[in-house]
Amino acid sequence: MKLEDLEAAARVEREQHLVVFLPFLRLKTACAVAGVEFVPLRDADDKVPEVLKTAREAIDKILSGYIDRHGKPLQNCVVATIPERG
């Protein structure tokens, strides 16, 4: 690992921002567990929830690297968020 990579990781850690997405988990609606909200990128009506609208494009780009067992690209995932932190 390069020094620049370590410095970048340290900056991210200090900023306390973390995105966790679960590409193979499926939920029709959001649910909360222990202060963490699990939100589907696209709901049952294929709409993106307000909390994820600004991240949709980036998440779609990340998802483009995943395929299902039939070789088709994933179009949906679940994103874990902490409501107070975004």
Image (cartoon, rainbow, N blue to C red):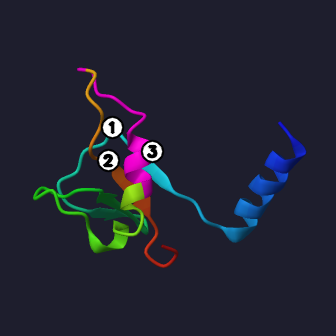
* Quadrant of the rendering where the N terminus is positioned: top right
The residue shown at (18%, 62%) is 47
Q: Which residue is mark 2?
A: 77
Does residue 36 appear to the left or right of 17 in the view shown?
left
Lower sequence index among marks 2 and 3: 3
Badge 2: few (under 14), some or many (20 or more) residues near its Cα, within 10 Å? many
Q: Circle 1 sits on which residue?
A: 24
Taking the magenta stretch, the answer to whether it contains residue 67 is yes
Marked residue nearer the N-terminal end (3 or 1): 1
User: Distance from label 3 to label 1 (Cα)?
Assistant: 13 Å
Considering every residue shown, the one lying at the far right of the view is 3
Q: Amino acid at mark 1?
A: Phe
CB of mark 2 within 8 Å of CB of mark 1?
yes
- Please, is residue 80 above or below residue 4 in the view? below
Mark 2 and mark 3 residues within 8 Å of each other at the beta carbon: no
Q: What residue is disc 3 on? A: 62
Query: Who is closer to the viewer here, 26 or 57?
Result: 57
**Span colored in magenta:** 58-70
Residue type of the residue flagged with mark 2: Cys
